[in-house]
Image (tube, rainbow, N blue to C red):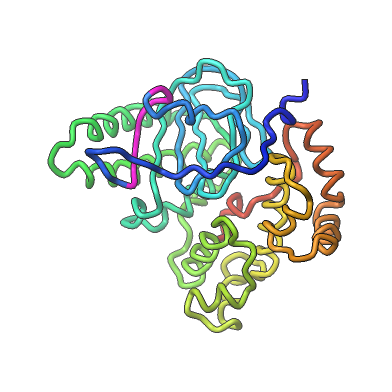
Amino acid sequence: MDRLRNTRLPDLPLHHLEVPLPHLLPFAIGTFDTIGPLSRAAFPHRHTFYEIVYVTGGSGAHVLDLVRRPVEPPQLCVITPGQVHHWAEADGLTGHVVLFNEDFLLPHADDAAALRILAGRPGHPAGDQAAPIAALLADMGGEYRDLRSGYQNVLRACLHILIARASRTLDRTGAPPEAPAPARDRAAELAAAFGRLLCEPGGAHRPVGWYARELGLSAGHFQTLVRRATGRPPGSLIRQQQTLEAKRLLSGTDMTVRRIANLAGFADAAYFCRFFRRETGMSPGEFRNWACRNHHDPRIESIAAHPDGP
């Protein structure tokens, strides 16, 4: 059965974080059951918020930006705003789900960069961090339920520790041990802000000059700082994001190529087709047919996977 074809939709749903009373925080924590059925969504979708999933049981696979990883508990999965993901053939998933907006990360600016690095893998083993992570999540769940004095500060502090422990799990999976701690200089901060804007829905529509103005820099200075931090000019990163967005829509929806071209930032569908072939070696139609026969595109590259990128 062509399971990936069966998950294609007219459009990609965009989920927002809606937290009920009494919390009203840009944060929620629970199990797959308490968070609700969308935590196990089998259709491609994306979020406006971050999600950390700690899978303790079950089977199937997690598909994140066309990369498929079997569920092998205990396992961490991190999804950042704008990424497209779903659970494929999932059965009996158990574990903790942590949801939060960018606002909840403000006390620890480096955590956003660490999360983008973690999101470069659709799932990886917890290793020797399994027990500490499980204990930390249990403590966070208790704080969230009990609403004791200062619980918001405790949750923010615990989230910071959770991200640090999650980053340690990459030490045995090929990532540089110090990757989640980018240099605190102007170029790195600027590149991180550029990356967040670029990954927003519709972010790849904007020209380089728009980003420079938004970040309060001249175009030349912006170009210099981004290249210093990432090794690549901002135009190259914009094209990479446009290609990724087109791949997401081609594989996850039934939208026409013309519509996808528009959503990826191209006014002319013919130019988009030439651009896509130049970037991928395939036409949009060839890629869609290929993606429907395969679970993921092994050639896909996301700027979230680059330790030194935005």
- Up the image or down, 169 lies above or below 87; here it is below
The range drawn in magenta is 26-33
Residue 20 percent across, percent down from the top left:
30, 38
Prevalent SS, magenta region = strand
> Residue at left 78%, top 32%?
294
Residue 284 percent across, percent down from the top left:
82, 49
Q: Residue furthest left?
A: 149
Instruction: Using residue 39 as the reference point, say whether residue 259 is left or right of it.
Output: right
- Up the image or down, 114 lies above or below 91; here it is below
> Residue at left 52%, top 78%?
213
Instruction: Using residue 175 as the reference point, say whether residue 276 is left or right of it.
Output: right
Pick the front one: 186 or 83: 83
Residue 55 percent across, percent down from the top left:
48, 25
> If the image is split into quadrants, where does the N terminus sit?
top right
> Residue at left 49%, top 32%?
76
> If the image is split into quadrants, where does the C terminus sit?
bottom right
The answer to if 165 sits in the magenta stretch is: no
The answer to if 28 sits in the magenta stretch is: yes
Pick the front one: 175 or 273: 273
Count the marks: how many?
0
Residue 263 percent across, percent down from the top left:
67, 57
- Up the image or down, 1 lies above or below 219; here it is above
> Residue at left 63%, top 74%?
208
Pick the front one: 248 or 235: 248
Pick the front one: 236 or 283: 283
